[in-house]
Image (cartoon, rainbow, N blue to C red):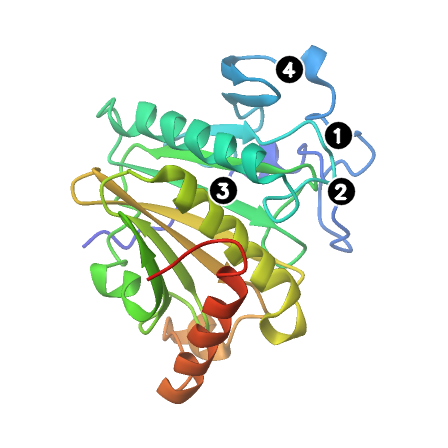
Amino acid sequence: MDKDPLVYQYAIGKRKPYDYDYGNRQGNQNAGCPFCDVAHLENIFEKDEDRIWLKNKYPTLQDTDQTILIESSDHQGDISTYTREENQKLMKFALKCFHKMLDSKKYKSVLWYKNFGPKSDGSLTHPHMQIVGLDKKDGYQDVGEDNFKGFEVGKSGDVEMNLSSRPVQGYQEVNIITYHNQDLDTWADLIQKGTQYVRSVLSHGVDSYNLFFYPMNDGQGTCCKIIPRFYASPYFVGYKISQVDDSDTLKWEAARLKGFVTGGISLN
């Protein structure tokens, strides 16, 4: 099994713009927001209204093909605050871009994720996702199907929502799965509801989260995993041991999440 880390190219990284306050972090904090300056964006692959998929101007990782998906022209936007229709369009566009790289078969694996907030390792506030092709590494080698299973919140058509009983990191991770890339409006709605729940209800509101997207069923389905970001447990940092809440707490959390979600979405 390949345990080699991804190699970060510091000389490129120190030129990246950023607007989160990380103290002495290297980078250009006064560069302005490049994603707001649409007229000067380069190497654009595809557009859909104000959603833009383009090559990452600062490819900091060796042996990768790094791309950015700008979600919106709203600098302060987020999945949790878009209109329902805007978010549905975003998730369909992003899934299409992801599959263009995945189906090209050019890479050992393709990763699709989103950073939000100061604890997510994000550098820019402007809402965006990243789709990254890894030339030599299987980014999914340490993630298995059991990481997508857990305490059911509900189902609707092809889509299931649950709280992971075997999280990748911990403690509460929300899985939203479309098993055949169908019912994508419902999938997008549940992702939006999940981020709203994390930001406003879970632990009295969380300021940071990540979204990670995993191909399932030989690429015929997709799991979106919402990971609220706290300061990582020393068990995970030092030993890669994830932690999870006890079963009674997860059952209670799943019921609370279902009550939050079913305010606008019908789940079985």
Question: Residue at label 4?
Answer: 41
Whole-percent x, y for residue 188 in the image: 45, 43
Estimate the spatial distance between the alpha carbons at disc 2 and disc 3, rounded to whole Å: 20 Å
Label 1 sits on what residue type? Cys
| Helix, strand or loop under label 2 | loop
Q: Nearer the viewer, residue 227 or 264?
A: 264
Mark 3 neighbour class, 10 Å CA radius: few under 14, some 14 to 19, many 20 or more: few
Label 1–label 2 contact, CB within 8 A: yes
| First-in-chain label (4 vs 2) | 2
Of the 4 image quadrants, the one containing the N terminus is bottom left
Is 220 above or below relative to 209? Answer: above
Camera-side mark, 2 or 3:
2
Camera-side mark, 3 or 1:
1
Mark 4 neighbour class, 10 Å CA radius: few under 14, some 14 to 19, many 20 or more: some
| Label drawn at residue 33 | 1
| Label drawn at residue 66 | none
Estimate the spatial distance between the alpha carbons at disc 1 and disc 2, rounded to whole Å: 8 Å
Q: Nearer the viewer, residue 253 or 230?
A: 253
Whole-percent x, y for residue 229 in the image: 56, 63
Question: Residue at label 2?
Answer: 19
Label 3 sits on what residue type? Tyr
Of the 4 image quadrants, the one containing the C terminus is bottom left
